[in-house]
Each structure stands twice: as structure tokens, then as C-alpha cells.
């Protein structure tokens, strides 16, 4: 198996950060456009998003929160792999698969939002991230033995 100490494991992190930034930009765009159309008021955000905020305006914020929850473990895993062990092609592949699945999850969530499709992609992405963590842990244990 080929191992590398190069930055390839960091590139999925950059892509995930870019996705998160894109979704974050979508939040004020949706809110301002809904405000201009008179569909909400600034008071609707006094304590977060009230029930007066239309669902299509709330979804980008919820997607953004999704990108700041479990995906944080992807950043940590990639950094851990980079500093603690020789990075394997499998680690790089798993990180990219995770990012790709999170892109797909966001695309589903922000467009047609079919819950079974979104839930499957969400769950599968989380499984991939767990596999990445297990692989990294095994590499670290093997290196310290």
C-alpha cells in the first residue's frame, strides 16, 4: 500500500469548508428576498427563527447547522491523519466520499427535500466518516506498536 505525508488529505477539508460557506451565503439571500416580498419581519428572528419564517427560508439555515455538526469530525479526522500517521489512499478516498455525500445531502435538502433520499445520504455519509475514523485509529495503533 502507498502512504504519503502530502497534503492530499487536506483537500476534502477545503471542499467541505467551501460547501459550508456557500450554504451560509444562501441564508441571508433567502431571508432578504423573503423580507423584500413581505413574507417575514425582522422580529421573526428575535429569538432564532420563529414559526412565521417560511419553510423554504428556514431550510438553508438547517442545512448550515447540519454542516457544522457531524462534519466537524471530518475536519478533525483529516487533521489527525495528517499529523499522526502516514496518510493512506483509503483515508483520502473516504474523506472525498464523505464530502461528496454531504454535497449530495445539501443538494437534496436545498432543492426537492425528499426526506427518505436525504436521510439515506445523510446516514451513509455518517457511516463513511465512522469508517474513516476506524481506519485512522487502526493506523495510529499499528504505528505505535
Image: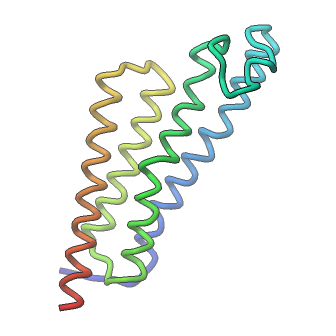
| Displayed quadrant of residue 4 | bottom left
In the rendered image, residue 6, in percent from the top left (x then y), is placed at 42, 81
Q: Quadrant of the C terminus?
A: bottom left
Query: At 17% across and 80% down in the image, what residue appears?
Result: 1
For the residue pair 118 and 65, the one nearer the viewer reads as 65
Is residue 134 depicted above or below 34 in this figure? Answer: below
Is residue 77 depicted above or below 51 in this figure? Answer: below
Looking at the image, the residue that sits furthest to the top is 38
Q: Give the total of numbered labels.
A: 0
For the residue pair 48 and 119, the one nearer the viewer reads as 48
| Chosen colour scheme | rainbow
| Displayed quadrant of residue 58 | top right
Query: At 36% across and 75% down in the image, what residue appears?
Result: 81
Decide if residue 99 is on the left or right side of residue 135.
right
Decide if residue 84 is on the left or right side of residue 11.
left
Query: At 54% across and 39% down in the image, what residue appears?
Result: 65
In the rendered image, residue 141, in percent from the top left (x then y), is placed at 21, 82
Looking at the image, the residue that sits furthest to the bottom is 145
In the rendered image, residue 66, in percent from the top left (x then y), is placed at 48, 40
Looking at the image, the residue that sits furthest to the front is 47
Query: At 78% across and 23% down in the image, what residue appears?
Result: 32
Amino acid at each position: 500500500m502507498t502512504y504519503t505525508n502530502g497534503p492530499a488529505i487536506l483537500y476534502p477539508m477545503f471542499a467541505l469548508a467551501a460547501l459550508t460557506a456557500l450554504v451560509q451565503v444562501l441564508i441571508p439571500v433567502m431571508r432578504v428576498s423573503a423580507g423584500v416580498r413581505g413574507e417575514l419581519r425582522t422580529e421573526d428572528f428575535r429569538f432564532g427563527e420563529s414559526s412565521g419564517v417560511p419553510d423554504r427560508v428556514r431550510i438553508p439555515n438547517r442545512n448550515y447547522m447540519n454542516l457544522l455538526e457531524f462534519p466537524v469530525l471530518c475536519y478533525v479526522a483529516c487533521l489527525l491523519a495528517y499529523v499522526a500517521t502516514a496518510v493512506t489512499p483509503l483515508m483520502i478516498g473516504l474523506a472525498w466520499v464523505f464530502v461528496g455525500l454531504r454535497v449530495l445531502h445539501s443538494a437534496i435538502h436545498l432543492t426537492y427535500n425528499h426526506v427518505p433520499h436525504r436521510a439515506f445520504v445523510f446516514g451513509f455519509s455518517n457511516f463513511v466518516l465512522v469508517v474513516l475514523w476506524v481506519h485512522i485509529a487502526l493506523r495510529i495503533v499499528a504505528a505505535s506498536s
